[in-house]
Amino acid sequence: MPRKTGKAEKKETEGSLPVGFFRNKPLIVTIVVIVVLVILLAVTGGNTTATESTNVIGGAFVPVQKFFYGISDSINSFFDGITSNGEAVQQTQQLDEELAALKGQMNNYDEMKAENERLREMLDYKQKNTSQELKVAAVTGKNPGNWFDVFTIDVGKNDGVEVNMPVITPDGLVGRVSEVGLNWAKVMAVIDGRSNVAAIMERTREHGVVKGSVSQNSLDSKLYMNYLPLASDVIEGDKVLTSGLDGLFPKGLLIGMVQTAQDSGENGMNVEIKSAVDFRRLEEVFVVLSVDGEATGAAETQQGSSSADIAPAPSTSPESGASASAEASAPQG
């Protein structure tokens, strides 16, 4: 049998491999590299130190490793950020709740502090005025309007309270009891337009009548003292006290201080007075049950007096005339 030539052998050999195998050089290179790496890993697997060839080949894959590591790190950071933001939102909500709770506690603390200060002042007054039997009362309601001109307190007949008993604070005179129930009483303040109080100037000892000026929705709570002699020596800041001549209020209770003074014709000098009590803010008051052992209010009631006996004329202007009862209760100085 004739021997095949070299060309024939080459053609037969190439025909036994896939078509185009030797033409796909990138594939061949890849396979070679993989085989080399496998061999190198097998050879150096038991060594603790990599050979120079392994270092060179491994170094070629460092950029690829860094690329994929960077992507992985970014993904981890993204999800870590989401988790951290969620925790931050929860912490913020918790802090807001704690802050709201602290604000509520501070408000309660401020309220308790203010109440303690008021009660401390009342206790000091009571300790300094042992001649007066005092009953502490809380304000529970008031008439509509800007001022505490007529208001309700939480003590009544069960506590020894009677009509016409004086009502005060440590600052000064508030008014008198106008109605009373078993466990409540209504108070008419001295600023009310129906109120008259026999008064005396502390410095000059001259007498007059202090009248209220407040009506419904009034914006001004000033008091006016009428029936002072025209020649009276009145200066700003003079104290005005109860004189006790009306039989309703004990002598010496502070009503207020003089602001201005002017002539008012037939009614003598007219004096504008700033009340010693803040009638925009009343929370606790004293009811004066007795002075030096003598009951207040009740004795006046037994004499037949009523609240109408001390009511002024309908007009509340400084120049208005006084009623006959007012003249009787506050004689000229």
Image (cartoon, rainbow, N blue to C red):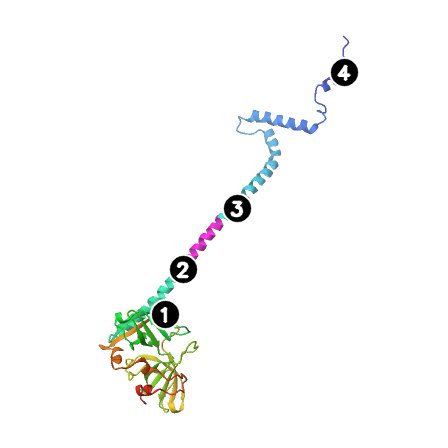
Mark 4 / mark 3, whichever is N-terminal: 4
Mark 2 / mark 1, whichever is N-terminal: 2
Q: Amino acid at mark 2?
A: Gly
Compared to residue 308, the image places residue 113 above or below, namely above
Residue 8, label in figure: 4
**Quadrant containing the C terminus in the rendered view:** bottom left
**Which stretch appears magenta?**
87-103
Instruction: Confirm or deny contact between disc 2 and disc 3 (CB under 8 A).
Output: no
Q: Nearer the viewer, residue 12 or 308?
A: 308
Magenta run includes residue 245: no
Mark 4 / mark 1, whichever is N-terminal: 4
Give the CA distance from mark 2 to mark 3.
Answer: 33 Å
* Residue labelled with disc 3: 82
Q: Amino acid at mark 3?
A: Ile
In front of the other: label 4 or label 3? 3
Residue closest to the far top = 1
* Residue labelled with disc 1: 141
Residue closest to the far left = 293
In the structure shown, which secondary structural element does the residue marked by tag 4 occupy? helix
In the structure shown, which secondary structural element does the residue marked by tag 2 occupy? helix
Compared to residue 329, the image places residue 76 above or below, namely above
User: Badge 1: how crowded within 10 Å, few (<14), some, or many (20+)?
Assistant: some
In the rendered image, which quarter is residue 299 located in?
A: bottom left
Residue 238 seen in the current view: no
Mark 4 / mark 2, whichever is N-terminal: 4
Measured as percent of width and height from the top left, residue 200 is found at 32, 84
